[in-house]
Structure formats: C-alpha cells, structure tokens
Amino acid sequence: MPRRRTPKKRFLSPDPVYDSRLIHMIVNRLMKKGKKSLAYKLIYQSMQQIAEVTQQDPVKLIEHAVRNATPLVEVKARRVGGSTYQVPIEVDPDRGTALAIRWILSSCRNRSGKNMISKLTNEFIDCSKSIGNAIRKRDEIHKMAEANKAFAKYRF
C-alpha cells in the first residue's frame, strides 16, 4: 500500500463485441499467461451457449450472476491488544465485483466437466439462479461477518 498518495483508478475500455466493461473484466481474470485472445474465445463461446440454453441476453444474465455473487460485507483480521479479531467491514462496490468474478471463475475451474466453455456456461447460469459454489462462498462470508458482528467496534 502506498504511503504518500493513492494511485488513480484505471478504467477499462469495454470489450469489442458486446461493449461491456464487465465482460472485459471477466476476460482479464480468465486470461492466463497473457493469452487474451483465447480468453475472449472462451467467454464469447460461453455467451453463445448461454443465449442458446436460456433464450436470454447473455450480457444481462452475466451481470445478474455477478450481482448475485457480490458480497456486501467481509471480515478483516485486526490486531487489538495482542489478540486478533475478525472484524466485519462493508465491501466497496468495485472490490465486491472483483471478488464475485474471482469466485465465479475459481468455481468454474474446480467444476467437473468436459471443457471450460461448458463449465463457464453452467456456472454463470447457476449464479444467475442464486445457486452454485460462488454463491455458497458469498453466503459463508456473510455468515462469518454476522457471527463476528460484536467486533464491529474495532472497525476504523
């Protein structure tokens, strides 16, 4: 963390096909070893499958899925007087979106299935229906924050 000033927030350009910043964020998190064209291919084929299966706009479905997986609170470890407390803290919207994307993609990678396209498609559809591993992860974080609500006074 910088000591002098906080760096300026960089804004992503929207993706070329759907003109959505969220899709571009997902592509950047999906990409491994700088292979962005492969990540674009995976996400676009997944979006075609979503459109075929659900008969809905895939961008809106993905936005809904990410919104469902976004946490409202998280816990942060704080040392007070020699003991460590898990303090619940409200999540900034940008960080919440980043966490949701990270959880969705990690649950895609852990899912059993043939290829990444089908795993991405199924995870986005599950998250839009409020089921799946990313939603379970969000619920665990919320439960942990609820259990440690007494330590909210150590928030700064």
Image (cartoon, helix red, strand yellow):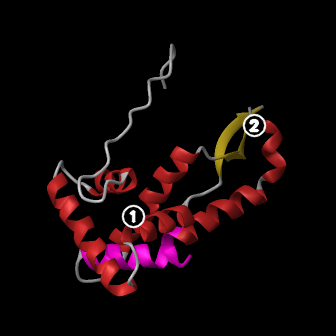
Q: Secondary structure at mark 1?
A: helix
Q: Which contiguous range is marked in magenta?
A: 117-134
Q: Residue at x 40, y 84 (%)?
A: 54
Q: Is residue 70 visible?
A: yes
- Find out whether residue 40 is within the magenta segment: no
Q: Residue at x 16, y 60 (%)?
A: 38
Q: Residue at x 31, y 42 (%)?
A: 13
Horizontal relation, residue 87 to residue 92: left or right: right
Q: Secondary structure at mark 2?
A: loop
Q: CA distance from mark 1 to mark 2?
A: 29 Å
Closest to the observer, 24 or 99: 24
Which image quarter is the C terminus in? top right
Q: Which residue is mark 1?
A: 106
Relative to 152, say whether 68 is above or below: below
Relative to 149, say whether 13 is above or below: above
What's the amino acid at mark 1? Ser
Q: Which residue is mark 2?
A: 155
Spot occupied by residue 55 in the image (x, y as percentages of width and height): 38, 84
Q: Is residue 116 visible?
A: no
Closest to the observer, 16 or 81: 16
Q: Residue 9 occupies which quadrant of the picture?
A: top left
Horizontal relation, residue 142 to residue 55: left or right: right
